Image (spheres, rainbow, N blue to C red):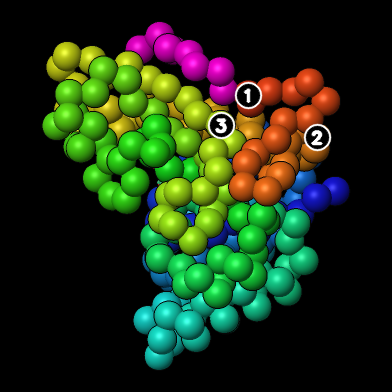
Amino acid sequence: MKRIVVLLSGRGSNLRALVEADLPLTIAAVIANRPDAAGLAFAAQHGIASQVVEHTTYASREAFDAALGDAIEAQRADLVVMAGFMRLLTPGFIRRFAGRMVNIHPALLPAFTGLDTHRRALERGCRVHGCTVHYVTEGMDEGPIIAQATVPVLPDDDEDTLAARVLAEEHRLYPAVLRAWCAGDFGLEGDAVAWRGGRTWPGAAHYPAC
Ligand code: GRF
């Protein structure tokens, strides 16, 4: 069975969605950069090994990333799954896990990289918003897109209602992508995602009832 390591910094609702999806993979460990990350408690409750690599205890970004990379490699993970990991990673770290690291971002990339995506989508008058799972490359939120899910932006939305609608889609999209990855349905070919065996991405644009 393939092995993943999940990296997180906080709430851990995407971790919960992955666990509840009962995927044909092993979550070898959850690694957090903050000891108070709620996702660690969830991991403990579900018998998943966890580890804290606390960024504040390292003298430099490079030193932190080296320790984090060593912790990941000790788990012999096939894939590093970032799920709300709120640290910028050094180019060296990203090269170390090139093609073996994915992230979920709460916007339809390439729009709204970075933070505050829901507020910015509202401010720009977007009528459609969503989330993206992508490979991680050196440019922040710029890696090859694996799959996306969309939601409507409703006239009376505020940041919280829109965030909740997107998060519900994240919780469907990330497990669907990892299920496809387990089946070998896609991979990186050069700088692009290639779908194999007639498969296509599992989140074809949809507008769920809301
Ligand atoms: C999600 O919105 C994800 O898209 C972003 O960080 C948030 C993590 O939420 N990268 P959670 O910790 O999984 O609840």
Please give the name of the residue rendered at 50% of the width and 86% of the height, measured from the top-left corner.
63
Q: Is residue 96 visible?
A: yes
Other residues around mark 1 within 10 Å, as few (<14) / some (14–19) / many (≥20): some
- Name the image quarter holding residue 203: top right
User: Was residue 204 drawn as part of the magenta stretch in this picture?
Assistant: yes
Where 31 falls versus 64 (above or below)?
above
Frontmost residue, 205 versus 37: 205
Outermost residue, front direction?
A: 190
Instruction: Calculate the distance from the C-alpha at mark 1 to the C-alpha at mark 2.
Output: 12 Å
Q: Which residue is mark 3?
A: 147
Q: Which residues are magenta?
A: 203-210
Residue 57 is left or right of residue 127, and the answer is right
Please give the name of the residue rendered at 41% of the width and 37% of the height, measured from the top-left corner.
109
Does dot 2 land on a helix, a strand or a loop?
loop
Whether tag 1 and tag 3 are in contact, CB under 8 A, the answer is yes
What kind of secondary structure does the magenta stretch mostly adopt?
loop
Residue 48, x across and y down, in percent: 66, 57
Mark 1 or mark 2, which has the lower sequence index? 2
Tag of residue 202? 1
Instruction: Calculate the distance from the C-alpha at mark 3 to the C-alpha at mark 2.
Output: 15 Å
- Name the image quarter holding residue 197: top right
Front label number (3 vs 2): 3
Mark 3 or mark 2, which has the lower sequence index? 3
Tag of residue 183? 2
